[in-house]
Image (cartoon, rainbow, N blue to C red):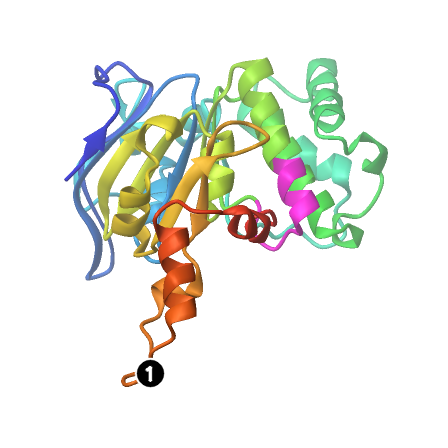
Amino acid sequence: MNRTSANNPSANRLSAENVTLAYDQRVIAEHLSVEIPDNSFTVIVGPNACGKSTLLRALSRMLKPNQGRVLLDGQVIQSMPAKKVARTLGLLPQSSIAPDGITVGDLVGRGRYPHQGLLRQWSSEDERIVRESMSSTGVAELADRYVDELSGGQRQRVWIAMALAQQTPLLLLDEPTTYLDIQHQIDVLDLCAELHEQQGRTLVAVLHDLNHAARYATHLIALRDGSVIAEGAPSDIVTAELVEEVFGLRCQVIDDPETGTPLVVPAARQTRVAPAVGVADTSSTTEARDVRDGGDVKDAVNAAKGF
């Protein structure tokens, strides 16, 4: 059952209407409809292989639906010229590979390609936009460095800078924190939040970490088996019942002590793993009951602080 926190009229710039998505004969999602609220930081979450990245590929014109349609500014995205789409919608794919021997400045400059043409070549405005994009992502000092010399966190910022140089009002990011350590994950998500809050861009990201999603998203879409189970503001929809329905994980949901957003605390192992047949451990049963029934959760919170 699709639960939403509010009714949303169909007036947003990017949406999918009753789409069926598949790779060859393998169907990933059927009759799937989503609306991306304008000026939102929308995050798509769900278990592995539920269709998160597939949906993002469809929204970005990388995958054509077998049925249904994806609309961008009221037009079927597949019918729009590629450069027109690229001037409206930027994409940071899950695995980005830079050409050998390319510098940071040159790679970011490629974000200006959709704005070039026979009557419009590279200009001082393009140069300014590239400098500003590198500055806003903290990679300006790396402009002359080769991309393949950089750390994973630095490379991710460079790719985001290239996407910013496109100057698109919509930016889609497929698992932008993958392979990054916790510090660089937070750096990248902080940068995304700044782009949304300070520049008014609409962001759509696929994230694996539900606590990151609940902390940063203004709009959350929870998928399972190619269907939307719930969507809305994280504070409205993230509950222990939803987490168990979507991820199959027993948990408690408490307030994040830093942000007040929902924080998912997995249930202790004793409550998730049934005891062996014929073995009774009353102490662990009592402890599990205390956690399950809302007892002292300090240990569980401390264990979750690495999110």
Q: Amino acid at mark 1?
A: Val
- Quick one: which residue is furthest to the bottom in this view? 278
Question: Does residue 173 appear in the picture of this structure?
Answer: no
Q: Which residue is at 43% across, 17% downward?
A: 39
In depth, the one of 238 and 275 nearer the eye is: 275
Magenta-colored stretch includes residue 242: no
Mark 1 lies on a secondary structure that is loop
> What span is colored magenta in the figure?
177-188
- Position in image of residue 61 (x %, y %): 35, 38
Q: Residue at x 61, y 53 (%)?
A: 97
Residue 118 vs residue 234, the one in the foreground: 234
Q: Residues within 10 Å of mark 1 (few under 14, many from 20)?
A: few
Q: Is residue 18 left or right of residue 74?
A: left
Q: Position of residue 10 (x, y in %)?
A: 22, 17
Residue 127 in view? yes
Nearest the eye: 75 or 271? 271
Q: Position of residue 141 (x, y in %)?
A: 85, 33
Q: Residue 238, image x and y in percent?
A: 35, 36
Rendered view: 57 above or below 303: above
Q: Is residue 249 above or below residue 14?
A: below
- 141 or 210, which lies in front? 210
Quarter-wise, where is residue 82 in the image?
Answer: top left
Quadrant where the N terminus is found in the figure: top left
Q: Is residue 181 left or right of residue 230?
A: right
Q: Quadrant of residue 9?
A: top left
Give the residue number, with chain letter if any, for mark 1. Answer: 279
Which residue corresponds to the image point at 58% horizontal and 29% vertical from the top-left? 192
Residue at left offset 75%, top offset 54%: 148
Q: Is residue 181 magenta?
A: yes
Q: Is residue 272 above or below residue 212?
A: below
